Every structure is written in structure tokens, then in C-alpha cells.
Amino acid sequence: MLLFLFSRVGRVLAIGGLSLLAGVAPTLAAADAPTQERGSAARLELPVEGTLPRLVGAVDWLNSPPLSAEGLRGKVVLVDFWTFGCINCRNALPHVREWHRKYKDQGLVVLSVHAPEFAYEKNIANVKKAVADLDIEFPVAIDNDFAIWRAFGNTYWPALYFVDAQGRVRFHHFGEGEYAKSEQVIRQLLDEAARDRKPG
């Protein structure tokens, strides 16, 4: 079991910074560089990395009817790829849960994509139990066939993709950590969305 955990952590840490996404081309160096805007706190450069792909192919949805990229326009979306047997995913989950609770009324939608690594994680009853046990209240797409996973060109657990209100992927993070930066991204995208909604 220890080897499995080390292997999963090692995979994320060793190659998490490489540009391996097919559908979403990351620009990690640019995304890490904060800039100073006149009269405001330092803001992150959040270049467009791609667009939110179609959210089709999930075998089931929990806590929500099926969501679509078109239906999420106007919302800031955090897409969280995870699987319930992944310890790194479980370590990141309290932060994702807190962001959902803190920002859902400001326009954030957290979309959890459960993509199984092992056979027992494909069992929908097991996923439902894990979702209840882990107190996950936000939508969960059960991606047993990896349709959404492939649409993103994703290769990691956990993986977070931050999508602005126009449906553009603006930031991503693989593995654990960088929680303060991730929350800053959420706030910044929510601020952008609020400015865009203002008349004139």
C-alpha cells in the first residue's frame, strides 16, 4: 500500500509540471507570475489555457442533474478530478469543500469528476457511499469511461481546472498544495465575472 501511495504522489510531483494536456495547453510559468495593477493588490496572470469541453459521457450524476458547458456559462467553475481511493484527493477535498461553501452564493460551481483508477472505484454504490461519507454536496459526474477525463486531456489525480464565466480555462493545478493560490484564482475569476455583469 505504501508503494502505491508513493507511486501516485511521485507521478504527480515528478511530472506534474510538464505540459502534457491535449485539450488544455498549460502555461505554468505565466500563471505563476503575479502582476501589480494600479490601485489594487497583486493579481495573478491567468492566461487562457483552453475552453471548458463538453461535459458528456458520464455514466451517472450525483447531487445534480447532468451539467453542460453551455449551461455553466456565466458561472465560475472549478472542475475537480478525483477518485475516492486516492489519498491525495482526500487530502485536497477539505479545501474544495470549503471553497464550495464559501463561494457558491457568489457564482462558483464546483464540479467533481470521479474518474476511477481501480475496479472497486467504478462501483456506483461505492461512489455514492464515499460522496455521503465525505460530505460532498456539489455535483459529481461519475466518469467511469473517462469521457470527461479525455475531453480535458487530463492525466492526474487530483487535478483542478479553474474556468471563468466565459467558459475559458484560466488556471490548473495538479496534486496537493497551493491552496492559497487556488483560492486567489477563484476570487479573481469571481471578481472578473462581477465586473463583466455591471452595466456600462
Image: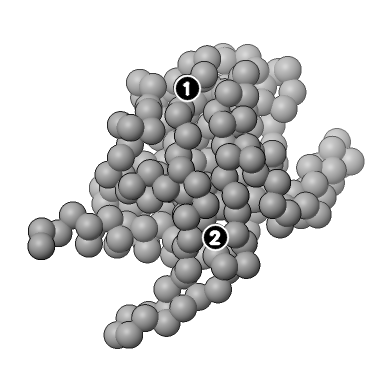
Question: SS for tag 2?
Answer: helix
Residue farthest left in this picture: 200
Foreground pick, 85 / 27 = 27
Q: Can the viewer see residue 94 in this picture?
A: no
Cα separation, mark 1 vs mark 2, equals 28 Å
Callout 1: few (<14), some (14-19), or many (20+) C-alpha neighbours within 10 Å? some
The answer to whether residue 182 is above or below residue 158 is: below
- Locate the C terminus by quadrant: bottom left
Question: Which residue appears at 32% of the width and 48% of the height?
Answer: 165
Question: Which residue appears at 54% of the width and 60% of the height?
Answer: 179
Q: Is residue 106 left or right of residue 171?
A: left
The numbered disc on residue 179 is 2
Which residue is labeled 1 in the image? 56
Kind of residue at badge 2: Tyr
The answer to whether residue 100 is above or below residue 62 is: below
Between tags 1 and 2, which lies in front?
A: 1
Callout 2: few (<14), some (14-19), or many (20+) C-alpha neighbours within 10 Å? few
